[in-house]
Amino acid sequence: MKRRWIIPGIFALDVTWVVLSLGLSYGLRYSAFAAYPPSGYKLVILTGVAVWTVLFRMMRLDGFDGGWRMLAIFSRLATATMLLMACVLSIAYLHQVYYSRLLLGYFTLLLFLGFMAIRGVVYQFLRSRHRRWLTRRVVLVGNDRVTREFAVKILRHPELLYDTVGILDLSSDGPARGVSSDVDRQTLSSIDVLEVMREHSVHELIVLEHTPGIEFQTFVGRCRSLGMCVNVLPHGYELYTSKVRLVDIGGLPLISLEGPVNFPLAAAVKRAMDLGFLVLLTVPAVVITGLAALMLVRYKGSAFRREIRIGKDGRPFWMHRLNVDRRPKDYPRYERVLRGLSISELPQLWNVLRGDMSLVGPRPESPERVGAYSQWLRERLKLKPGMTGLAQVNGLRDEHPSEDKATFDLQYPLEWSPILDITLLLQTFATLAKRWLREHNVASPINLIDHAVVRCAPQPGSVEKVADSI
């Protein structure tokens, strides 16, 4: 299977499953299994297929967008399935067609489980191709930091069918550590590098760091003459704050950096969503926060604290939280639970109500950190801070470097939609559940699958070559 058919193949399987799952639901409800339901259910099928076609494209539901992450796949498919069923119920109501509630319940459950299973099977299929070396062998060109970051991204994208076999470090400050720490490092001339790449059947060269000069251009030309595909990564952190579009002008490729598209009511819609979710969260949040506060008063004498944070457009505000230390050396179990499950952050719902924060957005940082921001990092200050965000669902917390979090936070406004906020909230709840299970040494399906991605992902080959004279 060629990789360009992977995503269309997943979509075709999804559409087929919409039809089959309705037939199975009918069979479960009326004990009359059939490959398809009676003609009276054509409205459900047509609506389901049409809505899923739109959602698949809008929400990028193939499972590989942004890298294979089980929590993201789970939350996106759960959100999309709920939206699909909402549309089915709405269309049925408008046409005054009524279906068994039990049948629709079966249909919803089978849809979600089937969509998850399809992506799991495709992932296992891609893993099998990696194990059998039915992949494209690539060499990365760049310094240690850049190649490590890119190698991790390749591991998270098995659909690319890439196998990283080595790196070329063009830096002059000595050999770089490569993708793997247990391989040999050698310093070679450009001719020797070409010979080694030919011996190991390298298919593609990915240039992550540009080196000006005729010699490097000659080396790239020789790689192309050997039949290798050469890919070049555009440079500049502006790529984190822009959508990239390739523009061809008379055969000359230009990279167009486009900013986020803001529709007039975006801020109002986001505020309305915050207030709507606050209504749903207020009662459980008050109960949980109250119990935690009583415990903190008993053991520490005070329940709450507030800290100065920098919000949208650089405006400072008081951020509220429970009186739990962020990084204590020896802290009791109850504090570990409060911080591990982010219960200590629940008082920030008051900040959301006041309008200082949103439920979803970049986490606000202290004046000391903001004072050290570079120009591109200050782009974070254009957004209203949030209780959770894209960086948090990817495992980053307050103690992580601002630069690492910004690479996720600055992508958020480029992709913002109400559906994205709902998806990120679901991912946050799933992340907290996963963290609780991990801290209590409980194996969960999500933990096992995510660990399998790291353990079983295609590892770099046994050859790493470092060139210093290209």
Image (cartoon, rainbow, N blue to C red):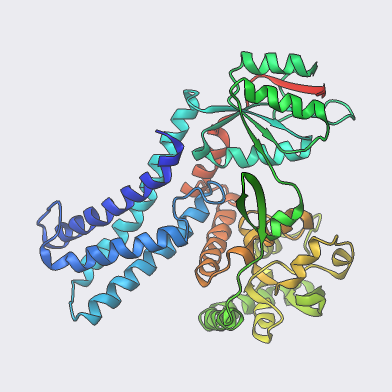
Q: Residue pushed farthest front? A: 250
Q: Residue at x 72, y 38 (%)?
A: 208
In the rendering, at what x and y percent does residue 417 appear?
A: 54, 70
Q: Residue at x 54, y 28 (%)?
A: 136
In the rendering, at what x and y percent does residue 426 appear?
A: 51, 64
Q: Give the quadrant of residue 139.
A: top right
**Viewed as shown, does residue 188 lie left or right of 159?**
right
**Viewed as shown, does residue 39 lie left or right of 139?**
left
Q: Residue at x 63, y 22 (%)?
A: 225
Tally of numbered discs? 0
> 65 or 279, which is in the foreground?
65
Q: Residue at x 89, y 62 (%)?
A: 372
Can residue 186 be seen here? The reply is no
> 5 or 35, which is in the foreground?
5
Q: Give the quadrant of residue 431.
A: bottom right
**Viewed as shown, does residue 128 lie left or right of 450?**
left
Residue 131 lies, with reference to residue 120, above or below; the image says: above
Residue 11 lies, with reference to residue 37, above or below; the image says: above
In the rendering, at what x and y percent does residue 288 appear?
A: 59, 75
**Viewed as shown, does residue 131 lie left or right of 285?**
left
* Quadrant location, the C terminus: top right
In the rendering, at what x and y percent does residue 77 appear?
A: 42, 58
* Quadrant location, the N terminus: top left
Residue 382 lies, with reference to residue 113, above or below; the image says: below
Residue 109 lies, with reference to residue 294, above or below; the image says: above
Can residue 239 be seen here? The reply is yes
